[in-house]
Amino acid sequence: ETSIAVGDTVTVDAQMTMEKFASPSLNRTFDRIRFGTIAGANAAAASASPVQHMKAPAADVHVEKVSGGLSVAEVWAAKGKLDKSQVVVRGKVVKFRADIMGVNWMHLQDGTGSPATGDNDLTVTTSEVAAEGDTVTVKGTVAADKDFGAGYRYPVIVEQAKLVK
């Protein structure tokens, strides 16, 4: 979201088209929508990057690490070494968004890491559903420095995760 005056001319770089995008703030689902970043002189008027808008607020959680698994902060600390590796992580779902780019997105926190450095929150993509407030264990593949384009870049993300019962 960016505040631009009516009549202003802008250039949009790094465009990304998303299908079936549900906007909670507009209470509307778009069949197709394009996202991008404002380029040039008007770039200063742009708000934070899309990833900043997608971050979950820091929650006061304390979830015990699953046996044989990693904590959220441990995944962040070893992200380069874990790239393309399977991990198991337990955490509280602090944010859940369904069917964006064909997958569900959740943010897990377990009380490890720091909100100041961002290593307290782990983004996970999955075909499964969980509710905000649920404590879940997931198994998925780590991707380090994942860039989806249009400013959607993740230093670490767990993809194709399955809920472990």
Image (tube, rainbow, N blue to C red):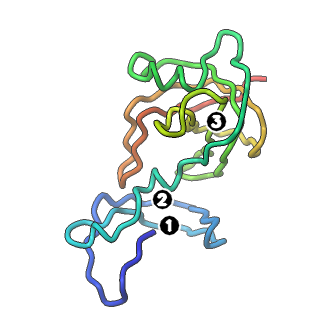
Q: Mark 1 or mark 3, which has the lower sequence index? A: 1
Find the residue positioned furthest to the bottom: 7
Q: Which mark is residue 117?
A: none
Q: Mark 2 or mark 1, which has the lower sequence index? A: 2
Q: Secondary structure at mark 2?
A: strand
Q: Residue 155, position in %: x, y?
A: 41, 35
| Residues at marks 1 and 3, CA–CA distance in whole angstroms | 28 Å
Give, as a three-letter code, the residue at label 2. Answer: Met
**76, above or below 148, in the image:** above
Q: Residue 51, position in %: x, y?
A: 45, 50
Which residue corresponds to mark 1? 32
| Residues at marks 2 and 1, CA–CA distance in whole angstroms | 6 Å
**101, above or below 111, in the image:** below
Task: Give the quarter of the figure containing the C terminus.
Answer: top right
User: In this figure, what is the number of numbered marks?
Assistant: 3
Q: Which mark is residue 18?
A: 2
Q: Which mark is residue 108?
A: 3
* Location of residue 35 (image quadrant): bottom left
**Residue at the location (35% across, 50% down)?**
149
**Residue at the location (36% across, 85% down)?**
5
